[in-house]
Amino acid sequence: MPVAGMISGLLLIIVISFLFGRVFCGNICPIGALQEILSIIPVHKTGSSIKKYSVPFRAAVFAVFLAAGLLFSISLFDIMGVKDFFHLNFASFSVLIFSAFLAASVFIYRPFCRFICPYGLLLSLVSAPGIYKFRRTDKCIECGKCEKVCPVDEAKRDDNKSECYMCGRCMEVCPVSGALVYSRKKEGFISPEKKN
């Protein structure tokens, strides 16, 4: 793909993420889709509250991706076996690296997205101040069910939703209709300043 096309595509995804949240990560990205499917396997999950470690780690990995690409013209995605995996080149040794992340996603929600993906870092930065998000309204009864079910610890009232992958688990468990909605901020929504 020509560089101009790649840049245009990335800019489009960035704009979409700012407007609507990380819908690309949650609903379009094939790497995210594979991890999401594997996360459904009913085994004990861990790592729902590793945000304070995963975010800075992914930032450091982003710097490594950038340096490898700009200074040495090396694609770390290729080295990690992402390209070979999706091209069904399972004879490649590098596929084992990506396969390990997929295996880990049975026990940890989206480890590749949360620790490695450089696009995930960019999209988290633009989705934090984004327009549409999952928001609590004044109908919220503070039951905490959304916080318990959120696999990335982004359901608390004052979370900026930068790590929200739009899985919708919070909406599924909310016991009060209209207490949690996907919308832009407006009258009737509870701000962090009003939390108990």
Image: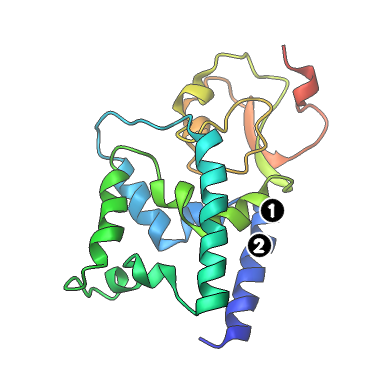
Q: Is residue 196 left or right of residue 98?
A: right
Q: Residue 132: x and y, percent?
A: 69, 46
State the residue in front, 98 or 40: 98
Q: Which residue is disc 2 drawn over?
A: 14
Q: Residue furthest front?
A: 71
Is 88 situated above or below 55?
below
- Amino acid found under the numbered disc labelled 1: Val
Is 99 situated above or below 50?
below
Residue lying at 51% horizontally and 55% vertically, measured from the top left: 61
Is 193 situated above or below 11?
above
Residue lying at 42% horizontally and 54% vertically, measured from the top left: 32
- Amino acid found under the numbered disc labelled 2: Ile
Crowd rating for badge 1 (residues with CA inside 10 Å; few <14, some 14–19, many 20+): some
Q: Residue 34: x and y, percent?
A: 33, 55
Q: CA distance from mark 2 to mark 1?
A: 7 Å
Q: Residue furthest top?
A: 196
Q: Secondary structure at mark 1?
A: helix
Q: Which of the numbered marks, if any, corresponds to residue 192? A: none
Q: Is residue 12 left or right of residue 171?
A: right
Does any portion of residue 20 appear in the rendered image? yes
Does any portion of residue 164 appear in the rendered image? no
Residue lying at 65% horizontally and 32% vertically, measured from the top left: 159
- Asked where in the image residue 71 lies, by quadrant, the reply is bottom right
Q: Residue 82: x and y, percent?
A: 35, 67
Q: Are marks 2 and 1 in contact (CB under 8 Å)?
A: yes
Q: Which residue is disc 1 drawn over?
A: 126
Residue lying at 32% horizontally and 42% vertically, measured from the top left: 39
